[in-house]
Image (tube, grey):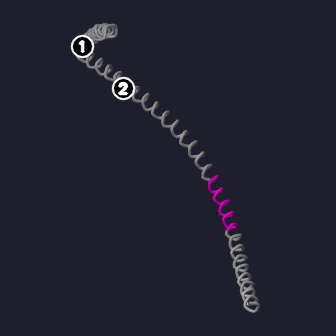
Amino acid sequence: MYDQLENLEKTILDIKKKYQLVSAELNSHKQQPNTDPKELAALKSKLDSSYAERDTVKKQFSELDKRYQSLAEAHHMIGEDQDKLQKQLNDLQQQSKSLQQQNNELKKQNSELQEKNRLASERTQVVLNRLTRIDQVNG
């Protein structure tokens, strides 16, 4: 049994030594991380490419924003022009309606004058016929 205890003690000491070695190695790795230069270069390259892509996207965004602002301004101006043209159209439609009413009134007056002229012409013809008969009788 004593031998077993000695073996156990020896095993425990071996485990302690291994633990201390592993612990020391772990601390060493923690303080000086082992980095692969190829992996580091690849990561730097990827980071640089991400920065370049970000800058490109920022530039595109800026250009699109300028274009949007320009289009928004043009849209606003077109809206104002449309409002002006709509007002002009409404004014012209009102003028057209007024002119149509005046035209209808003038047509009515013209018809009345034509009728009066026709009646006057008939009466003049009657008077001329009577005067002709009077001249024939007197003549």
Q: Is residue 136 visible?
A: yes
Which corner quadrant of the image does residue 67 belong to? Answer: top left
- In this view, the residue farthest toward the bottom is 137
Q: Position of residue 23 (x, y in %)?
A: 32, 9
Q: Percent x, y for residue 19?
A: 31, 10
Observer-side mark, 1 or 2, equals 2
Residue depicted at 27% across the width and 10% down the height: 18
Tell which of 39 and 116 is nearer to you: 116
Q: What mark, if any, has residue 56 been given in the picture?
A: 2
Q: Marks 1 and 2: CB-CB under 8 Å?
A: no
Type of the residue with mark 2? Thr
**Circle nearer the N terminus (1, 2):** 1
Quadrant in the rendering for residue 43: top left
Q: Is residue 5 visible?
A: no
Magenta segment boundaries in residue numbering = 90-106
Q: Quadrant of the C terminus?
A: bottom right
